[in-house]
Image: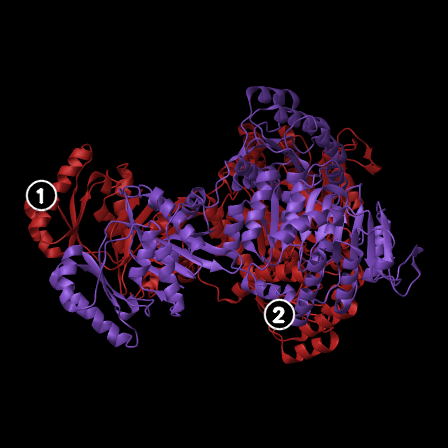
Chain colours: A purple, B red
Amino acid sequence: MKKRSSLHRKNLHKIFYPDSVAIVGANKVKGTVPYDILMSIVHANFNGVVFPVSPGERFIAGIRTYKYVIDIQEDVDLAILVFPSAVCHLALEQCGKKGIKSVIIISAGFREIGEKGLERERQILSIAEKYDISFIGPNCLGVINTDPKSHLNASFARKMPEEGPIGFLSQSGALCTAVLDYARAKHIGFSKFISFGNKADISEIDLLFYLMEDEKTKVILLYLEEVSNGKELLAAAREVIQKSGKPILIIKSGRTEEGAAAAASHTGSLAGSDEICDAAFEQAGIIRCDNIVDMFNRAIAFAYQPAPKGDKVAIITNAGGPGVLTTDAAIKTGLRLAKFSDETAKYLKQHLPSTSNRNNPIDVIGDARTDRYNAAMTATFKDNDVNAVFVILTPQSMTDIDLIAREVAKVSSHYDKPVYASFMGEADVQEGIEVLQRNGIPHYQLPESMADALSCVVNFNKRLELPASEPGATSDINNESVHRILNKATGNNQRLIAENQAYSILKTYGFPTLPVRVVSSEEKVKPAANEIGYPQVMKIVSDDIAHKTEVGGIVLNIQNEDEAVEAYGSIVRNVKEKSPESGIQGIMIAPMIKDGVEVILGMKRDPSFGPVLMFGIGGIHVEIYKDVSFRVAPVSKEDAMSMIEAIRGYPLLGEFRGKKARDVQLLQSCIVRLGQLATECEQIRELDINPLILLDKGCYVADAKIMV
Amino acid sequence: MKKRSSLHRKNLHKIFYPDSVAIVGANKVKGTVPYDILMSIVHANFNGVVFPVSPGERFIAGIRTYKYVIDIQEDVDLAILVFPSAVCHLALEQCGKKGIKSVIIISAGFREIGEKGLERERQILSIAEKYDISFIGPNCLGVINTDPKSHLNASFARKMPEEGPIGFLSQSGALCTAVLDYARAKHIGFSKFISFGNKADISEIDLLFYLMEDEKTKVILLYLEEVSNGKELLAAAREVIQKSGKPILIIKSGRTEEGAAAAASHTGSLAGSDEICDAAFEQAGIIRCDNIVDMFNRAIAFAYQPAPKGDKVAIITNAGGPGVLTTDAAIKTGLRLAKFSDETAKYLKQHLPSTSNRNNPIDVIGDARTDRYNAAMTATFKDNDVNAVFVILTPQSMTDIDLIAREVAKVSSHYDKPVYASFMGEADVQEGIEVLQRNGIPHYQLPESMADALSCVVNFNKRLELPASEPGATSDINNESVHRILNKATGNNQRLIAENQAYSILKTYGFPTLPVRVVSSEEKVKPAANEIGYPQVMKIVSDDIAHKTEVGGIVLNIQNEDEAVEAYGSIVRNVKEKSPESGIQGIMIAPMIKDGVEVILGMKRDPSFGPVLMFGIGGIHVEIYKDVSFRVAPVSKEDAMSMIEAIRGYPLLGEFRGKKARDVQLLQSCIVRLGQLATECEQIRELDINPLILLDKGCYVADAKIMV
């Protein structure tokens, strides 16, 4: 895999910047994909040579064709395959022989049609491996490079998009056409535009790295239906963001179960649980978006305006109502209203009529023309407390909409602060909006979207400035004994690790466990119980019993040796009665800890992201309020802390109702170590520490369940 | 107030359907409001006579003017005042003398500029009262009636909107111009369009009733910055919805505190707490919207399509990705995917290619043309399990966008089921979208908005079908003693009612209280304690102490008479030490109830909605998760139940962890009675029952605080 990745890094350049392109499977029939692609290349004024390859034609649209790629005498940098899927491998074999290393396979009829198609994919991949070919697709729309150096539209998209700083990657080809259409209307420009389809070879991860290094790309957008390798995606995103400072915005569809089912029938995707995906993206610094409109609303803020130095905004409006709505939206998304300096106040007083509102939000009033907008913008751009400016306009009968749009562009060009605009309405304001968009002023139909976009930029930049946290600082742990226990269990086809062994595993990984004794006959109870001390807890030890309470396998709050003997007897009786087929390895005696806060730590393996940790406070917090947080393991101390702080019940771990603050630092390191355990011991499928009793100083594992 | 309302009902008709209109303050200066209004009326082809009134001109735009309204010989139905605010009262006086009963005051310079303007408002209102005039405004844009019978554009909006089934009311004039512009671009039509400004006389409530009876209006929209009389608004909304079945959609701005501050500086509004507003709207069946786009997305669903019979939707798409996004959105908003019948499956198999997905969502594939969309629509419209159809389109190179739009309109016209469409993209799909909009097919840029709109319609209709619940079924309670206690307290300038008296008030209103004894000397403790029984609780009784725990004024779990005496002593000592200035009325002894769930009932008076009830479960539920619900009193049994079910912790009141279900029915009636108490005893400013201990059978007030 690693080897292919570095191959892709080399070959991807020729996909976007080829000197010559062969279209294998070209034809003369208008309205078909092969013909459309050839025309796309020609119409876009490709800066290179195109060779249509078609056994049956001598020329297409006046362009000389070749029977087979091997018939082309010159070197060919890129081949685009639009051959039927059943014979695609033959064409690819020929590309290999011709020495072509970069290929786009447009053809459908692969994985998305089932097992037969999947077999075809394996076949073409093995040919690619044989010849060191890298390919995009199959089942895709193609790629576009707006860079004048290449100006390649190797896709069957109708029109070439404008040039711009946004790199767009999409798993869905059909969505691409909607995106291109949407972007064209809004004058949103792309650096590279890539439909990668079934990603049988080159994946979104390879493309992320390519766009990281692409000078023309400032913002990376990705539409994803299937996260095939979550861990790699996160690692790649983290690296791209840290090295290049480029934001990554992702739409991951299939949020609901029904959505995921629809995804499965579409590209044969297997969607992971959505909360995990949310947490994982957050952890890697990826900005998750719900839909295309949200995504582009945020993308244009990153792409077309300077980064704000802080979260304080000035709002300028010619109508009170929208001013209120914008203020609401700003506060709701975590922005703050700037407080104007005396100088600003003075300037505004001089230049705005007395009926205007000169506080923030500034209301220049319905009959405002360019001069008042100019005054308000000039004053606020100069004010040191203002980090960004929102300009709102409603079309009154005296509003010179286009002139004000021009003024926004002109005034803002003198300052290194972002400005966003919302010209409300639709028909009358359209021309003004065009002026804004052509001048790189992000325009928003709604104040909410404007505030969301700025808030997104502010948060992303804030995070960029934090020192990069090590993903999973591991300590050196001698885990031989742990592997021995786990391997023995898996060897025996055991599903559950006995609790005392689970304790020993956790102890090895530095978890504070309680001193325990396991007894297996009544006469041994008294000495063991006295050794542990009172009050104490007794629990059944059995590989077969996952839910101890249900079989009467736990007695709490045992106060003396007589109660201990009684408890022993009752547990044995209960288990024999309620679960007669279960083996009994013994009865475990442990001290009973009071006055602690019970928290839950858990781990499960997600098919896409690998080991995922869960944290929550026990009881109703988890049960009723689903108040839990997730992170993908391994985790850094910072990850662990953010996981702890993410739950709503976090205040319960601080000083609360006269109780001392809990030992959060220790909890943090427990989470880090749990991450290490999950990473180092792949035999563990699931794990529950429920509860971990958290004291003001110290903590104890009070129940542990490890499934293999 | 009542009297003026019935006057308004009479006079409003002439505001929308006048035979003759006088424009008082007309002039010849293009680009000024008076001139623009005259031109609006003329250009809209008003079906009546217009009389410009202008002392200085003989004619305006060729139309004969009059010096004063009284100079007009004919009857005048409606006067539009565009006079400077300082002399507006003179013009209004003349209208009164002329016998004009219906007036629109466009002029600004009233309440919104402060005390002086408010005085002017009072002045014009008293003139209106003198002459039985009803007026809209001041400080507004005017009104529009698209009904061909009148075709009146009595506003300074640039263009007349299309005719349609939506009635629009707005407090903000500036927002109106944005709304008209937005609606025109989307072919959204209005029945009546009213900017009511400062609502010094005719309010949104009068206008709601007018639109209730207006045959041309099917859906009512309202943009509100200030809820001046919440109780009346709720009552009016309830009546309108129940009598006419017309949905009411409201944007109430000022959600955040900063937003509310901006609102205050705008129209001198006082915004109530936002959660209360949410709850109150919900209670009345009002649909609250966040912004104009959301509002119209929902409004067109109500206005232009038949009501769905259920919540099951069929999705038709030519692209898998958007199909997944739409499915996600549908499920998220509570809709369900229809399961197709065998007949439908058969039909789809016959008419769609084998590569298509014929389950729901139906994917007709990228190269689909009109015939496949027709097949998918025909099959799903006919299917009994389908209540509504979503049609998604992405612009592929072979997609005949306009024809498909026409097909949607044609096929859907044969069925009484709603269809909504989302043609994704922007430029290429624009023409198709126009076709849809002109044919009354609601179009949505995003699947989310489409799903939200349908879900909104489904929920509204579901609620309409429920039997109307009586708002606050009151029982006959002899509350003389209650008033005596409360009046005495207010007479004494007391803020807090002593707890034993609070108990007695609650007891009168049917709350189960505990038997209590109040003792004020140590020797009386033992007999009283023995009478109550053990375990028991002792608490300080004092008008001065609101937080008993803080002064050591509570001892719990007293087991016998010796502990009782000890507890008495310690409370007295504690209070004397920690709060020496507080009076001690005695010590209250009450039984201690165990094994109950502690819930909180509360009441506060909202400046806009009046008494508001709160319900939650005690402890961390309220403190950490803010898990509470609100309703405006009085409440019906159904309101009370919805309030109980609204909290996330509701399952804790059912059978939970082996405990019996709580007496929810009794809780429900406690809430209803609390609503009655709040309504009948206006002396109570705030009230807290914290906790009310809820058992499996029965409940007890265990602590009550009443503030006057």
Tell us which disc is closer to us: 2 or 1: 2
Image location (x, y in percent) of residue A396: 71, 37
- The answer as to whether the residues below labels 2 and 1 share one chain is yes
Host chain of mark 1: B
Q: Label 2: few (<14), some or many (≥20) within 10 Å?
A: many
| Left or right of A698, for residue B439 | right
Residue B530: quadrant of the picture: bottom left
Residue A398 seen: no
What residue occupies the far left of the structure in this picture?
B523
Query: Which subunit holds the residue at mark 2?
Result: B
Quadrant of the rendered structure where residue A525 is? bottom left
Nearer to me, B604 or B450: B450
The mark found on residue B521 in the picture is 1
Give coordinates of residue B590: x percent, y percent: 17, 53
Quarter that holds the N terminus of chain A = bottom right
- Give the percent coordinates (x, y) of residue A223: 64, 53
Can residue B645 be seen here? yes
Please identify the quadrant where the C terminus of chain A is shown.
bottom left
Q: Earlier in the sequence, mark 2 or mark 1?
A: 2
Q: Which mark is residue B151?
A: none
Q: Secondary structure at mark 1?
A: loop
User: Number of callouts in the render?
Assistant: 2
Q: Secondary structure at mark 2?
A: loop
Q: Position of residue B588 (x, y in %)?
A: 17, 48
Q: Is residue A170 left or right of residue A286?
A: right
Q: Which residue is mark 2?
A: B387
**What is the three-letter code of the residue carrying label 1?**
Ser
